[in-house]
Amino acid sequence: MNLKDYAPFSGLLIFGNIENLILSSQGAVAGVDPLTLLILSLIAVIAWLLIGTYGTKAAIKYADYIEIIGGVAIILLGMQAMLEAFGIII
């Protein structure tokens, strides 16, 4: 495995993992069954691992666009989490 192939996606890898932690903590605060939350989180992580592993070579030419779209999605989800934490429901 060559880690240089994943370099253009490093920002999404780091901030995507942080976002996964935020979303799982929202589930825990909302009272979701921890076992269900664990299983769903593992499914999501494994799915993204497989997509990232096999899709990198096909997506590398679109890395800049993917980075921008992913960054915007992460920012929007983070803002939603903060607003919900303050009791502002969207």
Image (spheres, grey):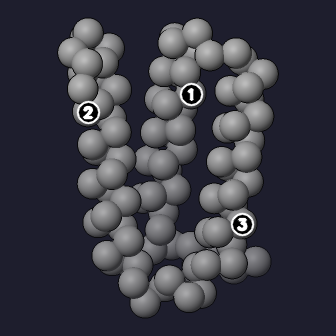
> Which quadrant would the N terminus be assigned to in this image?
bottom right
Amino acid found under the numbered disc labelled 1: Ser
Labels 1 and 3 touching (C-beta < 8 A): no
Q: Earlier in the sequence, mark 1 or mark 3?
A: 1
| Mark 2 Cα shell of 10 Å, populated few (<14), some (14-19), many (≥20) | few
Pointer 3: what residue?
50
Q: Earlier in the sequence, mark 1 or mark 2?
A: 1
| Mark 1 Cα shell of 10 Å, populated few (<14), some (14-19), many (≥20) | some
Q: Earlier in the sequence, mark 2 or mark 3?
A: 3
Labels 2 and 3 touching (C-beta < 8 A): no
Q: Note whether 11 is above or below 17 in the view shown.
A: below
Query: Residue 44's x, y, as percent?
Result: 65, 48
Q: Secondary structure at mark 1?
A: helix
Q: Residue at x 29, y 31 (%)?
A: 80
Taking the image as shown, residue 22 lies to the left or right of residue 73, namely: right
Q: Residue at x 69, y 37 (%)?
A: 40
- Disc assigned to residue 79: 2
> Which quadrant would the C terminus be assigned to in this image?
top left
Pointer 1: what residue?
24
